[in-house]
């Protein structure tokens, strides 16, 4: 993207004046290098979002933004229902509430080293992952509805975790707006035996080591120290979420047409929040969020079982669970007025600052932990939300490195076997993926996650707490 | 080169698929091959079982994505891969047969699961020689 087309408002904030059909400006948070490398399509897509009805403040792009479909990946936008604001199935995406959770293990590197290969094998064998895998649970239709209403709370009530886990999930792991009657039988059928499965693509289960702390006090409060072992799980709402999006996109294209909403592209399919189709999608999409957090909760249970069999002194405590592809109802200040807005985050992380009323008491002091996943060969980061971020981006920040290269390019450039070998030389064990899958996910196919995190901190969206490096990576 | 073929094209996060054919139906068949080739090597799939797929939409573009998503639904719920397709399109109604077999991880070595066909970069059009092209981005 050519920086000359943008107005630089500060070192890390780039601004595009509203022109044509845009109701609000576009604001991109990034440093000069990230802007130079950013696809022009981010500019175009963020400007398209700025033209949707009822958008307030700005159409934002996070430092890891890249070309998506409809919204850019790394796009954040808030809509006011009182101003004809819309909800967009395309703006949430197909993997509803795809997200990351991190678990502290109470172990340090010296506990892991002698058992590393054994642990990698057990995780790969016992965590259902990849195309066609099935979970251990098979849900009947009525159990499915209970899961969609209860989310992670449902999983905990079924014995897949502790009550204390719920404190560390956004909205305590249960979206109250979920309405299973608005989820199709197709979507439920697709989820029948996918609860507790990892999926594939960029999803992973990693064992990571804390290598550096940036904020000692906050790290202490998050119970993180150098050499600590952390488990990180990246996955989403599986077949149910994909099917909810698939079902509602064509409905919203038609609704937009009939209600006179001009869509710059079909993937921006949306409907007024205060319309029948809007309300139905909200009910269904929240089931998708509940499905994703229930899924990560059941996976957590499986991981705890594996650790308890192999390293019984481990105690896996949930640090936090974040969702990336969501639309949530939140209170934000707009021109001095507190408003109830529908905040779309497409490939962006909620990053609420200290004192936010939705956080549990201990996190009210620090702010919300923000988990940024790297690639199978690069660092992950734990950040914390800031007060300033609430104003800058509705309390949102980046979600990962973001791809720098297409899958096709990556599989031409690298051989999976070479990637696995060079990672092994660095002490990183890869399990589970096909060799072409590894090549497509090669670390070099992603942007530099450290640069993304640096820009995120310098823009004021979130603050760095800890850096982690991978030891074991299980892919689907 | 026959004028029925498929290709992948680059998209930074996901994958673009494109089918070409002398008729709309053949372009749709080719695009289904392109979709499957995102997941696995087409040569590994044996046409052991036949599944019927029907869908309907108001225009060719919505029908195209509807077709691919109906196929993904059958793949997901039957845990099958399909390597041969026969499509008929009449008045916005699509009737198709897909031949394939249950997923076998060792045999098919699936690379990635496709979550959905999207409206991103969606185009269905006929060129001046009457040949059809159908494309979109798939979410992986």
Image (cartoon, rainbow, N blue to C red):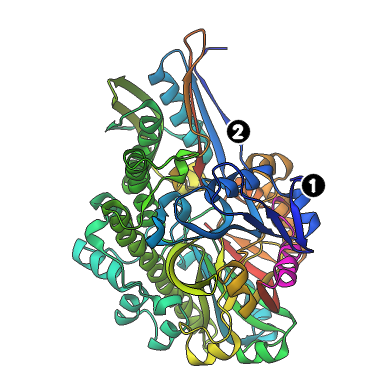
Q: Is residue A233 above or below residue B117?
A: below
Between A122 and A474, the one nearer to me in the picture? A474
> Would residue A17 be found to the left or right of residue B85 on screen?
right
> Would residue A175 be found to the left or right of residue A30 on screen?
left
Q: Residue furthest toward the front?
A: A336
> What stretch of residues is rendered in magenta?
A445-460
Disc 2: host chain: B
Residue at 31% over, 21% down: B89
Which residue does the numbered mark 2 point to in the structure image? B9
Q: Is residue A26 above or below residue B1?
A: below
Between A275 and A298, the one nearer to me in the picture? A275
What's the CA distance linking mark 1 and mark 2? 29 Å
Disc 1: host chain: A
Between A392 and A396, the one nearer to me in the picture? A392
Q: Residues within 10 Å of mark 2 (few under 14, many from 20)?
A: some
**Quarter-wise, where is residue A178 in the image?**
bottom left
Disc 1 versus disc 2: nearer the observer: 1
Q: Quadrant of the N terminus of chain A?
A: top right
Q: Position of residue B103 (x, y in %)?
A: 41, 44
Q: Is residue A323 visible?
A: yes
Q: Position of residue B77 (x, y in %)?
A: 32, 48
Q: Residue furthest toward the top?
A: B129
């Amino acid at each position: 993207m050519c920086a000359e087309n943008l107005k630089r408002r500060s070192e890390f904030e780039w601004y595009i004046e509203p022109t044509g059909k845009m109701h609000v400006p576009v604001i991109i948070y990034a440093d000069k290098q990230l802007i130079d490398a950013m696809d022009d399509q981010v500019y175009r897509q963020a400007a398209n979002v700025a033209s949707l009805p009822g958008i307030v403040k700005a159409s934002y792009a996070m430092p890891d933004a890249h070309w998506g479909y409809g919204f850019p990946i790394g796009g954040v936008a808030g809509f006011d229902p009182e101003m004809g604001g819309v909800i967009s199935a395309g703006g949430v995406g197909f993997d509803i509430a795809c997200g990351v959770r991190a678990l502290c293990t109470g172990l340090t590197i010296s506990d892991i080293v002698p058992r590393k290969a054994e642990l990698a094998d057990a995780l790969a064998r016992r965590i259902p992952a990849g195309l066609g895998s099935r979970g251990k649970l098979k849900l009947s239709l009525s159990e499915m509805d209970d899961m969609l209403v209860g989310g992670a709370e449902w999983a905990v009530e079924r014995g897949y975790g502790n009550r204390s886990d719920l404190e560390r999930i956004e909205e305590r792991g249960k979206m109250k707006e979920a309405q299973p009657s608005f989820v199709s039988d197709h979507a439920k059928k697709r989820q029948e035996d996918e609860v507790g499965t990892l999926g594939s693509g960029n999803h992973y289960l990693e064992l990571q080591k804390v290598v550096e702390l940036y904020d000692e006090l906050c790290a202490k409060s998050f119970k993180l120290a150098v050499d600590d072992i952390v488990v990180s799980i990246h996955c989403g709402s599986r077949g149910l979420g994909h099917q909810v999006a698939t079902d509602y996109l064509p409905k919203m294209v038609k609704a937009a047409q009939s209600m006179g909403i001009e869509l710059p592209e079909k993937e921006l399919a949306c409907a007024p929040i205060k319309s029948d189709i809007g309300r139905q999608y909200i009910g269904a999409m929240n089931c998708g969020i509940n499905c994703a957090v229930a899924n990560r909760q059941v996976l957590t249970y499986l991981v705890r079982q594996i650790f308890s069999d192999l390293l019984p002194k481990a105690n896996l405590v949930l640090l936090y669970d974040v969702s990336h592809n969501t639309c949530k109802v939140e209170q934000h200040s707009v021109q001095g007025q507190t408003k109830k807005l529908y905040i779309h985050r497409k490939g962006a992380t909620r990053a609420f600052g200290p004192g936010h009323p939705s956080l549990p008491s201990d996190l009210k002091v620090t702010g919300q932990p923000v988990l940024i996943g790297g690639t199978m060969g690069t660092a992950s980061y734990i950040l914390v939300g800031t007060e300033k971020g609430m104003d800058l981006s509705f309390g949102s920040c980046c979600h990962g490195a973001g791809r720098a290269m297409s899958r096709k390019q990556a599989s031409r450039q690298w051989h999976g076997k070479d990637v696995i070998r060079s990672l092994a030389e660095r002490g990183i064990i890869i399990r589970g993926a096909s060799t072409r899958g590894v090549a497509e996910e090669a670390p070099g196919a992603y942007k530099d996650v450290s640069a993304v995190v640096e820009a995120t901190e310098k823009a004021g969206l979130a603050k760095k707490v800890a850096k982690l490096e991978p030891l074991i990576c299980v892919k689907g | 080169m026959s004028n029925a073929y498929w290709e992948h094209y680059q998209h930074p996060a996901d994958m673009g698929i494109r089918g070409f054919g002398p008729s709309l139906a053949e372009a749709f068949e080719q695009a289904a091959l392109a979709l499957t080739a995102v997941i696995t090597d087409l040569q590994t799939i044996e046409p052991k079982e036949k599944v019927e797929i029907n869908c309907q939409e108001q225009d060719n573009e919505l029908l195209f994505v509807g077709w691919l998503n109906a196929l993904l639904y059958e793949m997901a719920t039957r845990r099958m891969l399909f390597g041969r397709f026969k499509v008929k399109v009449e008045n916005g109604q699509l009737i198709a047969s897909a031949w394939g077999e249950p997923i076998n991880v060792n045999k098919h070595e699936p690379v990635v699961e496709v979550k959905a066909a999207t409206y991103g970069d969606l185009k269905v059009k006929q060129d001046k020689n009457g040949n059809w092209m159908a494309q979109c981005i798939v979410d992986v």
